[in-house]
Image (cartoon, helix red, strand yellow):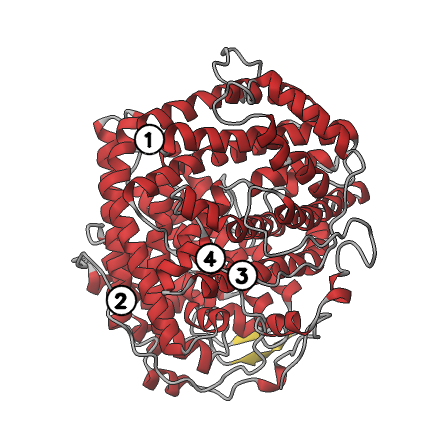
Amino acid sequence: MTPFTLPDFYQPYPARLNPNLEGARTHTRAWAREMGMLEGSGIWDERDLDDHDYALLCAYTHPEAPAAALDLVTDWYVWVFFFDDHFLDVFKRTQDMDGASRYLERLRMFMPLHGTITEEPTNPVERGLAELWQRTVPAMSADWRARFVHSTRNLLDESLWELANINAGRVSNPIEYIEMRRKVGGAPWSANLVEYATAAEIPARVAHSRPLRVLKDTFADGVHLRNDLFSYERETQREGELANCVLVLEHFLGYGPQEAADAVNEILTSRLQQFEHTVLTELEPLFAEHALDPVERLRVLKYAAGLQDWQAGGHEWHLRSSRYMNTAVRPTGQFTLGGPMGIGTSAARLGSLVGVSRTKRYDLSPFRKVGPLPIPELYLPFRSRQNPHLERARRSVVDWSRDMGFFDAVPRPAAPAVKAPSVWTERMLTGYDFAVCAGALNPDGSAEELDLGTHWLSWGTYGDDWFPQVYGPTGDLNGARAMVARLKSFMPLDLSTVDLPVNPLEKGLADLWPRTAAPMGDAHRAQFRAAVDVMLDSWVWELRNQHERRIPDPVDYIEMRRRTFGSDLTMSLSRFRNGRQVPPEVYETRPLQHLEAAASDYACFVNDLYSYQKEIEFEGELHNIVLVVENFLDVSRAQAAEIVRDLMTSRMRQFERIVAVDLPALYEHLRLPATARDGIDAYVVQLQDWMSGIVRWHEDTDRYDEATLRRAEAPPPAATIRIPTAPKGFVRTQ
């Protein structure tokens, strides 16, 4: 008996079959034998390859690829699946971490960004990679090549991450799992090959934009979650695998296999629908912003359509391949067009179930009364410290904020002569007590450093309040984007003269930027500027969701929350305090990236727990992890808060594990000198201070106190709330 019944999948696009299938089968069988992957490999024989039928996978996922392109793409997939099975046999079953690291390090030599391959391959995996690399890269640009190398290396590194989890007997938490699968799973790699197969390479200037990143991320989540449902039986019962989302939800939420499988399918559906939402609402503004010409626009749209084809074809292949649990279901048999096709036509095929699913993503009842949220007991293994210059910083931030105009009335963009109430009053700022937060974040800093840090906290929080008050009532997203562009102009990397600031937000940034950036070197100044840019862009993302009353899904929310909270900004300042001790590339390694993500998520969720009533009841907000979990898992507020607390504990445990295990291993792997190790150790302490300081501040501030909120309460602008036009297939509920 199978462990669960496969759920009803959201399949808005029919699968199509490439007419060059038989040629690809014949070609790739000969290629695999030539590379040494069949008889004598100890991994596969010809029957295994025929049963798996990777040519069928590629013919379904690339239905319009010419014969030569389909042959090459099929060879890539034969190579990657052979690598996966070879790694399982040689390293996962023996749990040989050292041998696995050396094996993966050698593979990097067969993907040179520049020049030719100089190493001699010693096994079928190396031989196949070398041959494929030489056949693929001449047709693609240097930008694509760099992106493909990055995703291929991540794909290889996934094996090491999975092996470490098997060795530790550890099941990831859901957020870590989806995040890691997205970063190091096969789907981002597959997305790069879609560009090749469709002859639609993404223009370099938009390849790293948010809309294109969301398309790749949602595509990746869809591919990986679908695979987890079909491969659960093989991975958990035959391979001892722990990296499977069904298993993760069983372990983390206490679900049985069927309930967990249904929940994974719900997440899968949500990710596919976000893909559609991004195509329909975010690509056209992206084209205009970057002035893409018609040919470039067509390439992006062909790429997006290629990702859709991959989803549909990948599902059909999973139904047919002997590799997966699929005996209880029948293939759909949808090989031809047979109905509306392409971007934006899925609504013609949606049923009531999909309408209900889409309904969950919209909140049409803002400002609902929720009352204070009881704060659960939080796991925090270190104590906060405080800067001795606290009182000076308290006085300084009030004086500075007054000078910047934070207590002045705010003009309406559409009618500058019409003044709205001030965003803040001096009494409000005093109660917020940002100096306590800044002092706990930098307890060893000088008086001047503490003043500067407190001013940044005041400016960032003021901006976070200012944007929805100024642009929220009208939904003026173009005005918000223009303001973000203008704010960025006040951060010149060469510290040149800027325009005269015309509002408190501009005036504050114009003052803070030279004070902060002048002592920095060029590289760190650019990094810090990028961190502020990310936070500014995230404010527009929040406004857009607010305008549409769209509740983000958990994965998208958590990644954007790190940006809206200013995590990158404060961490960048902490890095700067370490000076030249730590080489910049060390911060780009996986252990440091995961350390920062764990700390950021913990701090962000602290804020969401404390700000729940303020945001939901008093501001009509949607961007709160408790609300997101309530909505996504259909649980009560108390259950959602407990899930968030469990997630915070898991993130903190991850932080501790990285410090205790991963960082010492990184030191040895990179052969870091003592000065660099000391710098990273100091950075760890700064992150500990940051998390404990965030908790300390939330316990002390009155920003989230109900009595304070009542004093500042104004009638909610219900008349100006825009209820979005229902998307096609969306069932509006009253």
Report the Cα–Cα distance between label 4 and label 1: 27 Å
- SS state under label 1: loop
Residue marked by disc 4 = 3
Position of 395 with respect to 143 (left or right) is left
Q: 213 or 716: nearer the eye?
A: 213
Q: Which mark is residue 94?
A: 1
The picture quadrant where one finds residue 39 is top right
Q: Which residue is mark 3?
A: 5
Give the mark nearest the N terminus, 3 or 1. 3
Residue type (three-letter) at the residue carrying disc 4: Pro
Callout 3: SS: loop
Check the image and report above or below for 502 versus 142: below
- Horizontal and vertical percent for residue 71? 71, 28
Q: Nearer the viewer's eye, disc 2 or disc 4?
A: 4
Badge 4 marks a residue whose secondary structure is loop
Q: Classify 10 Å Cα crowding around label 4: few (below 14), some (14-19), many (20 and above).
A: few
| Quadrant location, the C terminus | bottom right
Tell me the CA gap for discs 4 and 3: 7 Å
The mark closer to the camera, 4 or 1, is 4
User: On screen, 254 above or below 296?
Assistant: below
